[in-house]
Image (cartoon, grey):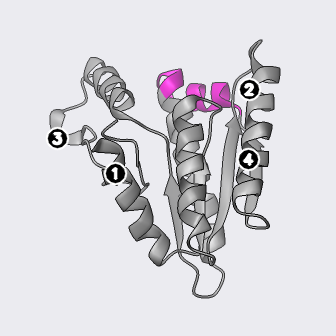
Amino acid sequence: MPLEQGLAVLYRAAQNSDFVIVAISGGADSLLALNLTCEVAAAAPQIQVIGWYLHHYSSGIEPARKAVIDQAALNAQAQIPGRFTLISETADIERTHRRLRTSWEHAAAVTRRRRLRLLANRLAKKPDSTVKVVTGHNHSDLEETVSLRRARLIPDFALPRLACVDEITGFLRPLAFC
């Protein structure tokens, strides 16, 4: 039942969207969100899907992560030929972390949201285009975010709510109840 709720959100979004941006990290949840979005887009021929990856830290797993993301892009292109694009960006989170004087995790989240909104705004400037953003955030991601924010003494009214559509950003979270 939880996944059906998220799929319903994706199908409703597909009815009046031209672009869907899926934030991918290479993890199972974001790859599932990408796969589900492409499945929905296969039935909605007006939709262009963009897989968006923000490279924001280096680690020993980067070659493996890149291979996973490249394979996911190939799978998406096979699902919706000619309607999938992979965009990869880089960001200096350490610099943002120092400038904002906040945790590294918060600086990364702020950077991801900002970059996603900028991309969505650029696409939306095309005449009559509608853009949706999809993330792979699931129930445990929400619990982690709430715990981290409570540790920083963020008041309860400012904490994110469990929903398939983020009430602040409008980003779609089809896996929110999973």
Question: Residue at 51% of width from left, 34% of height from top?
Answer: 29
Q: Is residue 159 left or right of residue 121?
A: left
Secondary structure state at the residue bearing disc 4 = helix
Alpha carbons under labels 1 and 2: distance apart: 28 Å
Residue type pointed to by label 3: Phe
Q: Position of residue 106 (x, y in %)?
A: 47, 30
**Foreground mark, 2 or 4?**
4
Task: Say if residue 37 shows up in the picture.
Answer: yes
Alpha carbons under labels 4 and 1: distance apart: 22 Å
Secondary structure state at the residue bearing disc 3 = helix
Crowdedness near tag 2: few (<14), some (14–19) or many (≥20) residues, C-alpha within 10 Å: some
Crowdedness near tag 1: few (<14), some (14–19) or many (≥20) residues, C-alpha within 10 Å: few
| Residue with the most extreme top position | 60
Quadrant (top left, top right, bottom left, bottom right) of the N terminus:
top left
The residue beneath circle 1 is 4
Q: Is residue 136 left or right of residue 67?
A: left
Relative vertical location of residue 114 with respect to residue 14 in this rendering, above or below: above
Sequence order check, earlier mark of 4 and 1: 1
Q: Which mark is residue 75?
A: 4
The residue beneath circle 2 is 65
Sequence order check, earlier mark of 3 and 2: 2
